[in-house]
Image (tube, rainbow, N blue to C red):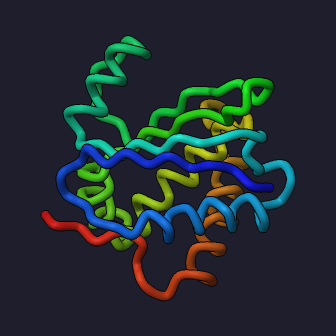
Amino acid sequence: MRRKVDIFDGSGIVSFDRSRLRKFIKLLDEQMPEEFRLPAGDLSIAIFNDDDLAELHRKFLDNPAPTDVITFDGDPDDGFAGEICVSASRALECAKIYGNTPSAELCLYIAHGTLHLAGINDIEAEDAAVMRRGEREAINILEKNFKKPIFKFNA
């Protein structure tokens, strides 16, 4: 499947080669099990800092708390799979807690967003187990195909 991936970086703390991030999405499209695949259509990825993503969280979900990822469903009939909004500053902070590199943590957030757009939820324990399985699949794809980090943090 060929999809356009628009990328916006408003974080102020990362640099990256957009083609490598697009390749990650392409590999997820090609290699994830069917149940974890994005719907058809173009994709938007927006990278923010904590404050800006928390403001989106407040505005659209009525929750002012910082978060790592927010997804907005698209309309595959209109050729739009959806939008994934992630926090680079949250990835930098949480990577230390979870023993990841900041780049891998941010890629995990993007993968988590793709799983939400694929219809995977993580509120109930049973659903969360499916989400964790999908995340492991995505991180395996990342580790197998990218020897160097996709993101470089400037903070």
Q: Most extreme residue toward the left, as rendered? A: 155
Q: Quadrant of residue 148?
A: bottom left
Instruction: State the residue at coordinates (40%, 42%).
Output: 46
**Which percent across, then down, holds residue 9?**
31, 48
| Image quarter (top left, top right, bottom left or bottom right) of the N terminus | bottom right
Marker count (numbered):
0
Instruction: State the residue at coordinates (53%, 35%).
Output: 83
Tell me, yes or no, if residue 126 can be seen here: no
| Image quarter (top left, top right, bottom left or bottom right) of the C terminus | bottom left
Instruction: State the residue at coordinates (56%, 49%).
Output: 5
Horizontal relation, residue 88 to residue 60: left or right: left
Q: Quadrant of residue 75?
A: top right
**Which percent across, then down, holds residue 109?**
47, 51
**Which percent across, then down, holds residue 11?**
24, 48
Decide: is 121 above or below 49. Answer: above
Tell me, yes or no, if residue 61 can be seen here: yes
Q: Most extreme residue toward the bottom, as rendered? A: 147
Horizontal relation, residue 105 to residue 20: left or right: left
Q: Quadrant of residue 72?
A: top right
Decide: is 139 above or below 77. Answer: below
Instruction: State the residue at coordinates (40%, 58%).
Output: 106
Decide: is 118 above or below 153. Answer: above
Horizontal relation, residue 88 to residue 35: left or right: left
Q: Nearer the viewer, residue 154 or 7?
A: 7
Q: Nearer the viewer, residue 1 or 39?
A: 1
